Amino acid sequence: MLRFAPSPTGDMHIGNLRVALFNYICSIQREEPLLIRIEDTDKERNIPGKENEIFDILALFGIEYQEQQFQSNNLRFHRAMALQLLQDKKAFNCFCSAEALKSKREAAYEGRCENLAPEEVIDNPLPFTIRLKKPTHSISVSDIIKGESTFAPDEIDSFILMSTDKYPTYNFACAVDDMLADVSLIIRGEDHLSDTPKQIAIHEALGYTKKVEYAHLPILLEGSLSIKWLLEEGFLPEAISNYLILLGNKTPLEIFSLKEAIKWFDLKSLSKDPVHFDIDKLRSINREHLRGLDPKELSRYVGFADEEIGNLAKLFLEETTTLKELRAKVGAVFEPKEVPQEYQEGFDILRDLTRKAPHFDDYESYKAYLIQHSGLNEENLLKPLRLLLSGAEHGPEMNDLYTHIKNYIKEVAK
């Protein structure tokens, strides 16, 4: 079992999606199921509906999974295992004040509550947390990407398992949930590397002996960029996936699909160093994926269902990189035109002639008709004609434009 464990506390960002993609790919390669676990135990920060957004984004990116789970549904197990650790004297009640606990986040816990007499615990009216006893030995983490790391007992400390509200901390809930799901490989960001020895310590205290593999992905700089924003800007899911797999990786191709990546992806090929998310590189990759779309499919993205409009859209890919930009270019062809005053007279003449003109199958015949009936020579005709056909002073070759809009020419000249 592999797992992707997002929290419904905000928009999914590119760092989250990168983790989800790698878990999905490895689950397919290893022929193991993928679990999506919504870590919703932080009640104050949860945003209603965010879990649905997560599932929608996973579906949009083609990330299939076999199980889904809400962490809050495991609360009874978290509490039962905390009680077991107390009974086994591997954890203890801590009555330190909230102020003391806050200060101890920056320093090692002094263990003042670890050896309280039973009556001091039973008769104590103060709120309490439950802490795991500090390990007596170092804990090693073998990481597929980072290699071996060793953490001394003082680095792990007697950390909190259950808060005063009787809800588990991140590390305790995560360790228990991974154990219950029989997770075999944990792929997550490097920022969680310091959590891993704590979760291993929890497993050891609970007598869980399964050897879990770990892969902590190098830090993704600018990794908080929202997936929702990228999609709204007109980046294709296929292009975003392509770039996130390409980042800091040795790949046989630069442009590829998720299905292709499954054949050769290897966690061991990932760089150990931080990687920088470059929006311009994503634009370049997005353009290539747009170019590779079937024309009719591309036409649907810009609001039509016509192969010719898809081919028209491809003409604008020299000057655009996203669907948002492409829609604006194609939209300008069909929308009322804003014309500079110096071209207005010629534009009006050409528009009126086009509305009355017979159908011409090729651009040269259409242009010859306009020259013959407008009184404009070719030099004076070209600029207002370009504005009429494209809504812009510069762009693709006029012959190419006309080829793809000739069946819509009356609508273009409205």
Image: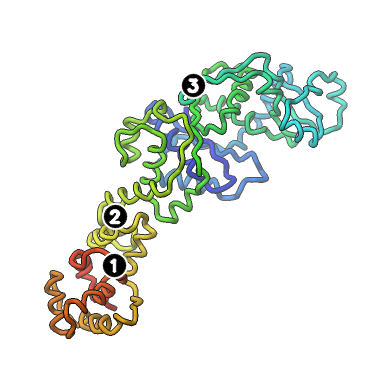
Colour scheme of the rendered structure: rainbow
**Residue 409 placement, left or right of 125:** left
**Residue 341 placement, left or right of 173:** left
Residue 61 numbered mark, or none: none
Residue at horizontal 46%, vertical 41%?
276
Residue at horizontal 29%, vertical 57%?
318
The residue tagged 1 is 394
**Residue 146 placement, left or right of 195:** left
Q: Quadrant of the C terminus?
A: bottom left
Is residue 184 in sight in this rendering?
A: no
Tell me which amino acid carries mark 2: Glu
Q: Position of residue 293 (x, y in %)?
A: 28, 51
Among the two numbered marks 1 and 3 on one chain, the one whose residue lies closer to the N terminus: 3
Along the viewing direction, whichever of 60 and 97 lies nearer the viewer = 97
Q: Is residue 249 above or below residue 238?
A: above
User: CA–CA distance between discs 3 and 2?
Assistant: 45 Å
Among the two numbered marks 3 and 2 on one chain, the one whose residue lies closer to the N terminus: 3
Tell me which amino acid carries mark 3: Gly
Residue at horizontal 67%, vertical 32%?
168
Q: Secondary structure at mark 3?
A: strand
Q: Nearer the viewer, mark 2 or mark 1?
A: 1
The residue tagged 2 is 297
Is residue 183 in sight in this rendering?
A: yes
Query: Which quadrant holds residue 116?
Result: top right
The residue tagged 3 is 147
